Amino acid sequence: MTEVKLFAAPGEGALVPLGTSTRRVLVDLPELMLVEFSFEAGGIGALHAHPHVQSSYVAEGRFEVTIGDVTKEIAAGGAFIVPSGVTHGVKALAAGRLVDSFTPRRDDFL
């Protein structure tokens, strides 16, 4: 049986460069995944959709967030949720960090 990782230390996990952002998988199970994204000011999380439900917490910075036809500015301490299959994306208005959870896990991130 594979050992389940239940904890992540600060900075633990491989950083995946994505142009003006990076991605780090923090912890995951088949049912749930927690991922940290760091963005440079002006960085874009391009519009996309996936079957996973996503909730996101703005840990640092300020983002323009588009979900479907609605765009709002969300600053540090704010959060948003993306239903399954809905087109969404972000633009970093300042350098910042998002902590995203996905259910089920995004196997394409592993």
Image (cartoon, rainbow, N blue to C red):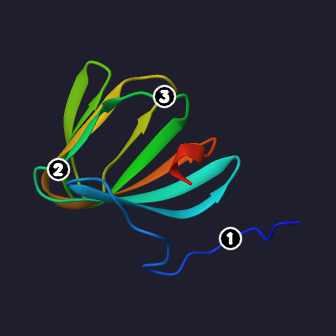
Q: Report which residue position mark 1 lands on.
A: 6
| Amino acid type at mark 2 | Gly
- CA gap, disc 1 to disc 3? 26 Å
- Residue 94, compared with residue 46, is above or below; it is below
Mark 2 vs 3, N-terminal side = 2
Mark 1 vs 3, N-terminal side = 1
- CA gap, disc 2 to disc 3? 23 Å
Q: Report which residue position mark 3 lands on.
A: 83
| Amino acid type at mark 1 | Leu
| Observer-nearest of 29 and 64 | 29
Q: Nearer the viewer, mark 1 or mark 2?
A: 2
Is residue 17 at least partly visible in the picture? yes
The N terminus appears in which quarter of the rendering?
A: bottom right
Q: Position of residue 34 (x, y in %)?
A: 53, 57
* Residue at the image point whose x is 31% and y is 51% from the top: 78
Q: Report which residue position mark 2 lands on.
A: 43
Q: Position of residue 26 (x, y in %)?
A: 52, 66
Q: Which of the 4 image quadrants contains residue 72?
A: top left
Q: Nearer the viewer, mark 2 or mark 3?
A: 2
* Residue at the image point whose x is 63% and y is 58% from the top: 28
Q: Secondary structure at mark 2?
A: loop
Q: Secondary structure at mark 3?
A: loop
The extreme right residue here reads 1
Q: Secondary structure at mark 1?
A: loop
Is residue 106 at least partly visible in the picture? no
Left/right placement of residue 58 relative to residue 25 reads left
Left/right placement of residue 30 relative to residue 45 reads right
Q: Position of residue 52 (x, y in %)?
A: 55, 34
| Amino acid type at mark 3 | Pro
Left/right placement of residue 18 relative to residue 26 reads left
* Residue at the image point whose x is 56% and y is 54% from the top: 110
